[in-house]
Amino acid sequence: MTSSPEPSISHFEESFRHDVISLWERCGLTRAWNDPNKDIDRKLTDKNGAFFVLLLGNQLIGSVMASYDGHRGSIYYLSVDPDHQSSGLGKLLMDHCETFLQELGCPKINLFVRRGNEQVLQFYEKLGYAEDQAVPLGKRLIPDN
């Protein structure tokens, strides 16, 4: 009997780019106004964060970006292949990010969830995240299109 491989987390490598973008598309994370290739390129210049991928054997099934600005940590692009969701892999990625950020001395993590995405909000609530009394504001400095 052949056992299935255990999931493993490693740092992003360029050879994962196409699979990561495909994963983000399957998970509904891409938007017309954000070029995923540019987001990856920008992340690769981040000296205070990390870009992790989740592998099951040779198959990329998850990804997450973590950053730390010296005040707060941030989580972006957490994704798990829809065929593998609800199996604890999102929690595995978040635990990995929390440990990574805590080792940097990060006291708090912020993340964004798009309005109406109740399934993801429930996921984060189960992990102990709650809505802050803050209003996120944004301003585009460099258009991606």
Image (spheres, helix red, strand yellow):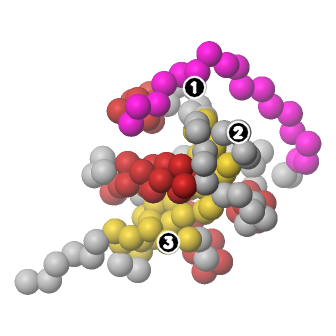
Counting from the top left corner in percent of width and height, residue 38 is at 78, 60
Determine the secondary structure under disc 3.
strand
- Binning the other alpha carbons within 10 Å of mark 1 as few (below 14), some (14 to 19) or many (20 upward) gives few
Q: Nearer the viewer, mark 1 or mark 2?
A: 2
Determine the secondary structure under disc 1.
loop
Mark 3 or mark 2, which has the lower sequence index?
3
Q: Please tell me how many numbered marks the rendered image carries.
A: 3
Query: Is residue 128 covered in magenta?
Result: yes
Main SS of the magenta segment? loop
Name above or below for residue 19 compared with residue 71: below
Residue projecting furthest to the top: 133
Does residue 18 appear in the picture of this structure? no
Q: What residue is disc 1 on? A: 115
Q: Is residue 114 left or right of residue 44?
A: left
Q: Which residues are magenta?
A: 127-143
Q: What residue is disc 3 on? A: 10
Name above or below for residue 105 compared with residue 125: below
Q: Identity of the amino acid at label 3? A: Ser
Mark 3 or mark 1, which has the lower sequence index?
3
Separation (CA) of disc 3 from disc 2: 25 Å
Q: Within the image, what quadrant is residue 4 found in? A: bottom left
Q: Identity of the amino acid at label 1? A: Arg
The structure residue drawn at horizontal position 68% and vertical position 49%, both measured from the top left corner, is 68
Q: Within the image, what quadrant is residue 36 found in? A: bottom right
